[in-house]
Amino acid sequence: MKILKILRHWLISFFRKRRNILEPCLLNYIPENLKTNDREPIQIFNVGEFLFFRCKPDKLSNPYNSITLAELSHNRSGSEKAPISIPNDVLYNIRADKNFEKYEDMVVCTIKILDLTESNQYNKQFTDAKNNSARILLLHDPVPCMFPHCFFRVWYNEEVATMDNKIDKKYNELRNKLKHELASMIYTETLSQVG
Amino acid sequence: MTDFEYIASTTELEQSETFGLYYEKSFNLKPSSQSFSNFMTDVAELLNQILASFELTEYQKEILQNFFIAFNDIRVKIDPNRLKSFKYEFNNDDELVLNRNTEKGIINIIINPNECFAFSVIPKDFHIRKSLDFYYEDFKDFEALAYKFFS
């Protein structure tokens, strides 16, 4: 019986992955509206849309100074007409291997999208004095327990920056420019804590 | 800190292999009840603390020292009240960042591990122009930037 159960689970996972369908969210404390279920990503953003970033209270004035810009996770607010999340939603723990519901010791930094490409993408290019280039792209990336999840992907000379390759260390000017760009989008420092 | 304690700590720092060069160059002042302000003690301690806390490159130590000399020059020659507190951090990208969060916005001095440092101003009002400038090896006017940092 147990083997059949495992096999069934594996087959469902396999076909879900093949069809790009996410696992269902099994965390009971996550509100229904935040669960992805079978919703598709919305790869269109809105000027004026907010992005929410979880950070430590002492980094609130500019959290981007402190971090490496690789797959930088945020939650998106959605448009004013069709909101999909509020700031505090980003404080939910969405990992089943962690035994708590909310990040009680963290706060929310809100940034605002000020401009987009014609196709409503946040996709910006930067160059440095040596003709190196960097690109930053915002992608909506729903995960089972957080539909509003999105992240900034960064490329340096066409190579994706990851936490492992530390590629950003080679490009001082570009790294400084990208962090400056994100910091200049900070909209509010209003503390938005759990509760 | 009393004068005696100051002399003791200065001697200790100057003898230290790590701090000797930087500390001596930056703070070869002798204390007097009039001129040796609490701020100077704070700044000296701050430099000491930064140098001790992080593994800075020679480039970062040099730029940091130039800024601290400029901070001191502002205090002595221009306006002691100009100097204000600031925060610092050494991040995962090995950048040493000195920053001030003012009512008008965020001012950063970002000292990269090599090659260049950056000075950025990010106004809180979206309508005011943000700025990010880079400075390379030939840059000399640290006093002007230090002055701007405290504006």
Image (cartoon, grey):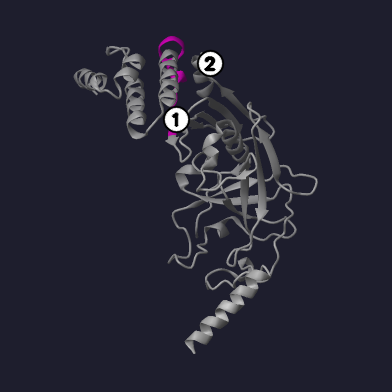
Q: Which is nearer the N-term, disc 1 or disc 2?
A: 1
Q: Which residue is mark 1?
A: B86
Please give the name of the residue rendered at 27% of the width and 23% of the height, measured from the top-left corner. Answer: B17
Please give the name of the residue rendered at 40% of the width and 30% of the height, measured from the top-left corner. Answer: B56
In the displayed structure image, the side of residue B54 where residue A159 appears, left or right = right
Quadrant in which the N terminus of chain B is drawn: top left
Circle 2 chain: B
Q: Alpha-carbon neighbours of circle 1 within 10 Å: few (<14), some, or many (≥20)?
A: some
Indicate the secondary structure of the residue bearing disc 1: loop
Is residue B132 visible to us here? Answer: yes
Circle 1 chain: B
- Residue B114 shown in magenta: no
| Residue A128 higher or lower than B142, as above or below | below
Residue B88 screen position, x and y as percent:
43, 33
Q: Which mark is residue B139?
A: 2
The amino acid beneath tag 2 is Phe
Q: Are marks 1 and 2 on the same chain?
A: yes
User: Which one is in front, A194 or A137?
Assistant: A137
Please give the name of the residue rendered at 79% of the width and 49% of the height, measured from the top-left corner. Answer: A119
Which is more foreground, mark 1 or mark 2? 2
Res A156 quadrant in image: top right
Residue B63 screen position, x and y as percent:
45, 22
| Residue A22 higher or lower than A10, as above or below | above
Magenta residues, start to end: B75-88
In the displayed structure image, the side of residue B50 where residue A141 appears, left or right = right
